[in-house]
């Protein structure tokens, strides 16, 4: 199966054509008789591709384009002037494809340099999904009035018996004729860089970057707990960045400084979509649970504000200064201002939510939105200073300070209530929360070279966080590390062990979760629940590696590392996390024309969590507790082989990866959960891939050959288990990004001139 090509830009097609004209140009042009340049083509690889895939899964071509047709797999055209002071280079990778790269550089030695690049990066999320909606305008999804009216009438007439089976039966005839949709986007990256004054004591760089993202991806919209509506979110992003920087050098240091300005524009700022179960607007205190026996009311249309246009400006500087022959100081400073002033939407589109139904005003009327735009502004300050010196007999000292401060001084907007899921007015006052924080890391290291015994080191690091509107005002973590590096003969050893503690400065305040409410109600989370990024913990980490060259042509590297984070002061939440990883690299240089490489790694992660099932108020009954133990094992192994003999060149690459997860859930009898059900398909997947390339040199300028790639991917995940377009409470796109078996073959020609 060969399908799902992203629409290729005219620029990409034109660039591929220009590249092909260049390489097919007459010999006098390549020789550069009039230009003063001598050109060399090394290499040009032209390939015809064939793809056979047994499913419509997007995963095989998630980030690449191997569909049927031709591609300019590689092209490098270089020109050098007669005086060797000027160099021109054109480069193409996968020309004419969705994953193509086109580049050009022009370099005048010791003077200036120009670099141009155009890069395409596809991202395919899923194929052959299905939706009921038609996109009638960018970001506007509509349903036929007849469908909405029929489903609304059915729900009203059958409200007392509505359940999943009944709703599934009435929606399936409509899903049978639903349109197909592929979820994918492509990133078009353009970059132009000019460097002036190269080779001198001072030089300037002007850099311009633009990335255009076009396509769609899944968006989780909703009309309530029983009416999730997954839609393709239109992606039309444009990010532009311009940088100007200067660098000054002298005998004992270097200093750089500059300014960077960036903008983000979203051509589709709002998503609108019809409610499949309602044709007319209505409201009800339980409408956010519709459609069901409690309510069949709700909005006929919903909307969601998407990524907002924004911009940022940054001043930055960095430098290195030498002190004598043994000391140095590195410093860096960045100041960034972020701004966003997107227009705010009304409370709802539901025209039934107004004074007549208990709201303080007509919530659908934009005039009743008290704020016209977001008016958000924040700043980030980054400071880094590092000092190092060598002294005495083999001693080395290093000190580093790393500080970051994020400050949001935006005005706090307050609303007297909000509309829940487009369905009902909630008279609960809300307020924006301008989260701010700063982080400071102070570290020091002291090393001593003991000669044949190796170098021993001691490291100390303190990390301090200060936060606003979080559960902790501050946390402090102290870590001590011991290091050892040694060489015994040709064998190199490296080892490191770290241990530390993180403590909360003051008290942990669960009430911070209520910061977006003007009036805090009763606590809705467990008093003993701790967020893992702020919870007190103890940590231990280690790292060990050894590189062993032997028999002159063999190299073996063994490595292992592990970590344990113990959250022993947390009553609920993450309690313990352990990680153990080990692997090897083995290479063999068989001779000047052959090499062999093997590698492998296993990583195991174990996680313990504890929670307590609660309703509207937190439970105090230990029988409502539940616990889960996650175990993840990931294996990755591979090989690579290259061989040249008698005009033949061969390559073989293969890798195998497997992920095996287990979730063991327990709950005591007698509580709310009463019984826990674990699952052994916690993201279980396996992929096997082999690629072989064989080329034969017909002449010194022409090589022909072939390439074949085989991949087999399987996945067994509880997330995907029994998925379909309609599940209890949810209409899903259900795009295919699952299993596949694929063969990709290519006939290739390589030209060198």
Image (spheres, rainbow, N blue to C red):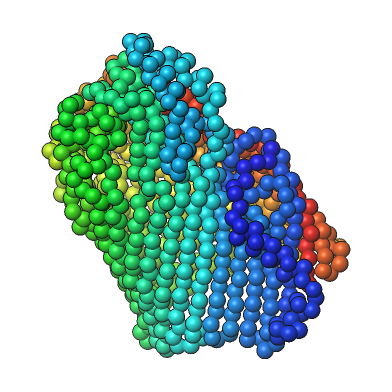
Coordinates of residue 526 in the picture (x, y in percent): 22, 33
Residue in view at x 37 percent, y 44 percent:
270
Residue in view at x 78 percent, y 62 percent:
750
Residue in view at x 18 percent, y 50 percent:
412
The front one of 132 and 537 is: 132
The front one of 706 and 629 is: 706
Q: Is residue 153 visible?
A: yes
Coordinates of residue 266 in the picture (x, y in percent): 41, 52
Quadrant showing the N terminus: top right
- Quadrant housing residue 39: bottom right
- Quadrant housing residue 118: bottom right
Quadrant showing the C terminus: bottom right
Taking the image as shown, residue 283 lies to the left or right of residue 562, namely left
Furthest residue toward left: 519
Coordinates of residue 569 in the picture (x, y in percent): 24, 41
Residue in view at x 35 percent, y 28 percent:
300
Coordinates of residue 501 in the picture (x, y in percent): 28, 51
């Amino acid at each position: 199966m060969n399908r799902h090509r992203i629409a290729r830009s005219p620029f990409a097609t034109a660039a591929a054509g220009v590249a092909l004209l260049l390489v097919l140009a007459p010999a006098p042009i390549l020789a550069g008789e009039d230009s003063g340049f001598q050109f060399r083509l090394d290499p040009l690889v032209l390939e015809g591709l064939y793809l056979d895939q047994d499913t419509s899964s997007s995963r095989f071509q998630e980030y690449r384009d191997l569909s049927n047709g031709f591609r300019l797999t590689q092209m490098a055209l270089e020109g050098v002037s007669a005086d060797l002071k000027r160099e021109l280079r054109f480069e193409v990778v996968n020309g004419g494809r969705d994953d193509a790269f086109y580049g050009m550089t022009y370099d005048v030695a010791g003077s200036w340099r120009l670099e141009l690049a155009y890069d395409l990066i596809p991202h395919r999320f899923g194929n052959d999904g299905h939706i009921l909606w038609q996109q009638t305008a960018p970001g506007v999804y509509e349903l036929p009035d007849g469908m909405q009216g029929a489903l609304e009438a059915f729900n009203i007439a059958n409200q007392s018996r509505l359940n999943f089976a009944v709703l599934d039966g009435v929606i399936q005839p409509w899903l049978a004729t639903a349109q197909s949709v592929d979820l994918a986007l492509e990133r078009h990256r353009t970059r132009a860089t000019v460097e002036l004054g190269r080779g001198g004591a001072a030089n300037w760089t002007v850099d311009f970057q633009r990335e255009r993202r076009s396509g769609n991806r899944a968006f989780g919209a909703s009309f309530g707990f029983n009416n999730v509506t997954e839609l393709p979110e239109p992606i039309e992003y444009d990010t532009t960045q311009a940088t100007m920087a200067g660098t000054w050098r002298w005998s004992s240091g270097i200093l750089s400084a500059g300014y960077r300005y960036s903008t983000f524009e979203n051509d589709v700022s709002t998503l609108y979509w019809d409610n499949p179960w309602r044709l007319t607007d209505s409201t009800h205190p339980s409408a956010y649970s519709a459609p069901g026996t409690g309510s069949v009311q709700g909005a006929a249309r919903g909307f969601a504000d998407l990524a907002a246009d924004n911009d940022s400006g940054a001043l930055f500087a960095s430098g290195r200064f030498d002190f004598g022959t043994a000391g140095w100081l590195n410093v860096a400073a960045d100041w960034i201002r972020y701004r966003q002033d997107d227009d705010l939407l009304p409370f709802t589109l539901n025209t039934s939510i107004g004074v007549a139904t208990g709201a303080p005003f007509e919530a659908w009327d934009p005039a009743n939105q008290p704020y016209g735009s977001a008016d958000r502004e924040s700043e980030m300050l980054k400071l880094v200073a590092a000092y190092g010196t060598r002294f005495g007999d083999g001693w080395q000292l290093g000190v580093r300070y790393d500080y970051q401060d994020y400050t949001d001084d935006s005005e706090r907007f307050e609303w007297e209530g909000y509309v829940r899921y487009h369905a009902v007015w909630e008279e609960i006052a809300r307020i924006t929360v301008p989260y701010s924080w700063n982080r400071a890391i102070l570290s020091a290291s002291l090393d001593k070279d003991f000669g044949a015994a190796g170098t021993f080191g001691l490291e100390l690091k303190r990390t301090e966080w200060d936060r606003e509107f979080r559960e902790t005002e501050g946390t402090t973590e102290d870590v001590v590390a011991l290091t050892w590096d040694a060489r015994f003969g040709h064998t190199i050893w490296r080892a490191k062990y770290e241990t530390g503690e993180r403590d909360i400065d003051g008290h942990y305040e669960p009430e911070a979760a209520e910061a977006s409410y003007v009036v805090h109600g009763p606590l809705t989370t467990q008093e003993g629940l701790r967020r893992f990024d702020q919870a007190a913990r103890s940590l231990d980490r280690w790292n060990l590696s050894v590189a062993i060259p032997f028999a002159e042509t063999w190299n073996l590297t063994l490595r292992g590392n592990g970590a344990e984070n113990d959250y022993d002061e947390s009553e609920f939440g993450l309690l313990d996390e352990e990680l153990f990883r080990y692997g090897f690299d083995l290479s063999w240089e068989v001779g000047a024309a052959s090499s062999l490489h093997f590698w492998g790694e296993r990583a195991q992660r174990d996680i313990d969590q504890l929670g307590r099932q609660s309703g509207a108020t937190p439970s105090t009954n230990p029988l409502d507790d539940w616990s889960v133990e996650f175990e993840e094992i990931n294996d990755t192994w591979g090989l690579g082989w290259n061989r040249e003999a008698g005009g033949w060149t061969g390559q073989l690459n293969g890798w195998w990866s497997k992920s095996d997860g287990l979730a063991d859930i327990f709950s005591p009898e007698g509580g709310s959960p009463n019984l826990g059900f674990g699952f052994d398909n916690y993201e279980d997947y396996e992929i096997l891939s082999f690629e072989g390339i064989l080329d034969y040199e017909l002449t010194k300028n022409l090589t022909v050959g072939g390439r074949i790639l085989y991949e087999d991917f399987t996945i067994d995940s509880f997330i995907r288990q029994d998925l379909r377009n309609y599940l209890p409470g949810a209409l899903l796109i259900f795009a295919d990004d699952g299993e596949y078996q694929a063969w990709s073959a290519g006939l290739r020609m390589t030209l060198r001139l």
